[in-house]
Image: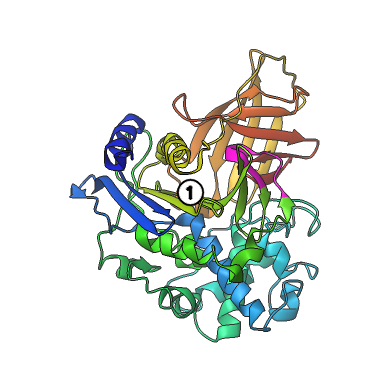
Amino acid sequence: MPDWSARLNELAVAAEVTGAVLGIWHDGETTIVPYGILNSTTQTPTTADSLFQLGSVSKPWTASMIVQLAAEGRIDLDDTIVKLLPEAPVDNRITVHHLLTHTSGIDGDLFTDTGRGDDCLERYVALLADVDQLFEPGTAYSYCNAGFVLLGRLIEVLDNRTWDQSLKARLIEPLGLTHTVTLPEEALLHNAAVGHLATDGSRVQTWQLPRSIGPAGTITASAADLLEFAKLHLTERYAAMQVPQVPFAAGIGGFVDLGLTWRIYDWGGRRLFGHDGTTISQLAFLRIDPEARLIMCLLTNSGNGTRLFEPLASEVFTQYAGVAHPEAPQPIDAPVDDRHVGRYERASVRLDVEEREGQLVMLYQATGDRLSFSDDPVHEYELRPAEPADGNHFVTRESTEHPWSPVTFAPNHVFVSGRVTPRR
């Protein structure tokens, strides 16, 4: 059996990750391994029970509560949002199912801070009146944080309490979780990680996303608690969440389909499910192999988390399931033209594609509320041609040390980071 503490240490040093916790559950046996420090300023060491932000790994928790409400007969996944929340200023065709599968068409990266009060989700939902509809509901996939805030508000109305309170009553307390929180004053009672930039490892100044983003990404938890939550999804009650609903064409990391919020992966012919999460230089990863009864999570407080996750996941899954993390797409030698040159824009992000000496470059600019917590608000990405060689498919990467990820152009938009960004 590998020494996972030694392997985590070796790979984290190579990836320049500040702190991390690896969690493995395999057929009833749990391994939790910490590495590094939680805060470069205080030099607090990472421990097995340290708390890290889960980011979008929070979304399956919110989705699980929606599935509970459906099982209780209080909602139907085909119900429209305006039927359940008449005050929601969204397209009257958008359903609960659309929100769970990121197919609503709402331009979803709205990060407005609507305060710390218990009405923050209600106030956030009212802001959606000013958000664009990118496409007809149900006709495409585009990652949508706002949709999960809408689901969180729906939970609040049906349960007559805040989303945070429902999370405690429906999941945290029944599962016996003692290291899972949503608010900073709760995290202060534990050893909690702070984020560190990928570029130089310096500690970032903003700790958490606004409370209004809670249902989409503010759960903070230990690796052990995250494994306990994941084990819940090996039971029949939540099996429908793993049924493919929407194909994911980009296929990065083996992600081939979307279930009810869970991402479904094909790793060497084995079907896994899971989710990733990114907040302010804290990256979280969760993968579950039901057939092997294997769960792996990795919590990091570094923008370099992906550099650590991919080789470590390959070793863990090779050991227990005989499969490795899929190889990242690679660039090819092919000519490019200027058909995709121009500006692309959605909520919180502006992308400018330029041609330089026969190559395409994409300039990323965080805008609006995203500027207040963006690690790297302005970044330049090289776009390299990729298969299929039709002039529309490219790959890019954060740096030469990071894996390539796909970028796909269509006549009226670019699909990057799982999001449709319209051409302006």
Going by the numbered disc 1, the residue's amino acid type is: Leu
Task: Find residue 170 and report its horizontal and vertical position in percent.
Answer: 49, 78
Q: Residue at x 40, y 37 (%)?
A: 308
Q: Is residue 96 above or below residue 328?
A: below
Q: Along the line of sight, which residue is nearer the eye, 313 or 390?
A: 313
Task: Find residue 108 and report its horizontal and vertical position in percent.
Answer: 63, 56
Quarter location, residue 357: top right
Q: Along the line of sight, which residue is nearer the eye, 348 or 244?
A: 244
Q: Is residue 201 on the magenta stretch?
A: no
> Residue 377 vs residue 240: left or right?
left
Quarter location, residue 191: bottom left
- Badge count: 1
Q: Secondary structure at mark 1?
A: helix
Q: Along the line of sight, which residue is nearer the eye, 402 or 173?
A: 173
Q: Is residue 224 above or below residue 67?
A: above
Q: Is residue 255 on the magenta stretch?
A: yes
Q: Which residue is mark 1?
A: 371
| Range of magenta residues | 247-256
> Residue 141 vs residue 40: left or right?
right
Q: Residues within 10 Å of mark 1 (few under 14, many from 20)?
A: some
